[in-house]
Image (cartoon, rainbow, N blue to C red):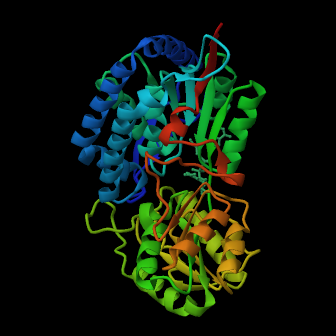
Amino acid sequence: SAMPLVSVNPTTEQEIERHPLHTGREVEHRLDRAASAFEVNRSRSFGERAARLERAADLLEDNAPALGALMTEEMGKPLTQAQAEAEKCAWVCRYYAEHGADFLADRAVETAARKSYVAHEPLGPILAVMPWNFPFWQAFRFGAPTLMAGNVVLLKHAPNVTGCAEAIADLLREAGFADHELQVLRVDEETVGTVLDDQRVRGATLTGSVPAGAAVARQAAAQIKPTVLELGGSDPFIVCADADLEKAASVGCTARMQNNGQSCIAAKRFIVERAVLDDFQERLVENVEALTVGPPTDRETDVGPMARADLRDTVHDQVERAIGAGAVAVAGGHTLERDGFFYAPTVLADVDPGTVAFDEEIFGPVASVIAADDAEHAVALANDTRFGLGGSIFTEDLEKGERMARSLEVGCVFVNEMTKSDPRVPFGGIKDSGYGRELSHHGIRAFVNAKTVWVE
Ligand code: NDP
């Protein structure tokens, strides 16, 4: 019945492809195959699963240029960043191939029993609803540990990156996950609901906006299914009076503008002690104005187009409302007169709490600069948000930096570094940014049954 999924090249505005939605019969077929694929994967040894993940890592590395080109074509991220994304996916595959068996090994527990321990068993097919901003990384960040644990994946990707979704399924098949252990579902929101209700599906994860996460979690809860949510953020980037301003401005620029400004863990609110505000802001603007904006296929390009026209329009509307509320655009502040969904890298000065650029997530290349009286005030401002994903603090006093880090209401915090994901440390948020953790041993235990076995 419904409209096909359409991918549009955000640089040329030309349609790439129309992918028809799966029919109800096809969805049923895929659910059925997921259930039988689960029986296959759960009975494999850790060693067999690890060998497949290693093979997937090899394929990701060998094909990084082509996979990168596909990401760039569908959602516009600079090609260099897209290739790096494919390589990072290889890293997460190898990480779980190497450590997964340890993370899920039986854990002996001393009790009065002859023998007692915790076993970690897979749950079944897990639905993954994923966004377009890191079309490979988001899928592998979830998929690698999930397959290693013995579960299988139903991937409902964002419509504009359907080509990436199919490429991921193909790659895993080639790596030896041959029995439909990761299948793509080309479905609309209504069918996502039907899939969540299906008893063969045993859990769900969503990365995306707060309303999307709430909708999926509500429906999963009605069927008593576990969920992990990785939603938006409005991450603080605190610059203390004693910070290395040159480093803070350069790292801050990257942290805000990489991936064309479309990252949940991008630095969004630059909270700067008044004593260094003008100095830092000038340096930030210098860095932002030095960025090369252009076709993402050019190797020199730092910032390409946004992924969709409506996302660009939303960002521009937010910028206009911010200016209406007293902010000043000291760089950018407008769309670009050229083909493609480009938005000028922007710096908003004089942003106050209670206004749009402070309270809402701006999912595009727009930095907001906010004045703080002192370090304590900076922390209070940082926490004055419904989000709680990541945060950064720049200071030359590492003890103070760590103290401030401990008082931020976030899932991860970095002192003198930008917020980033790394397979070795947990990733996720608190408050409206979501719950549950991905990556590290936490991520691989998200969808397992920690089963107590007691032998008297
Ligand atoms: P969405 O959150 O709407 O989309 C993300 C994924 O969720 C897509 O696969 C989408 O599919 C699906 N989805 C959305 N609503 C539902 C629903 N009710 N039931 C089931 N699945 C659903 O993001 P947008 O692309 O529209 O971006 C809007 C905003 O979301 C951004 O401006 C940003 O603030 C935030 N966002 C955050 C991301 C992050 O990394 N945390 C990534 C992307 C966006 P479909 O399109 O088919 O509905």
Q: Which residue sits furthest left?
A: 62
Residue at the image position 40 percent from the left and 52 percent from the top = 9
Tell me if 32 is positioned left or right of 44 in this view: right
Q: Which residue sits furthest top?
A: 456
The answer to whether one can see residue 361 in this image is no
Tell me if 293 is positioned left or right of 324 in this view: left
Residue at the image position 39 percent from the left and 40 percent from the top = 164
Establish if 286 lies above or below 32: below
Could you tell me which quadrant the C terminus lies in?
top right
Q: How many numbered badges does the structure rendering display?
A: 0
> Image quadrant of residue 305?
bottom left
Residue at the image position 36 percent from the left and 81 percent from the top = 290
> Image quadrant of residue 10?
bottom left
Could you tell me which quadrant the N terminus lies in?
top right
Q: Could you say which is closer to the camera, residue 60 or residue 2?
A: 60
The answer to whether one can see residue 263 in this image is yes
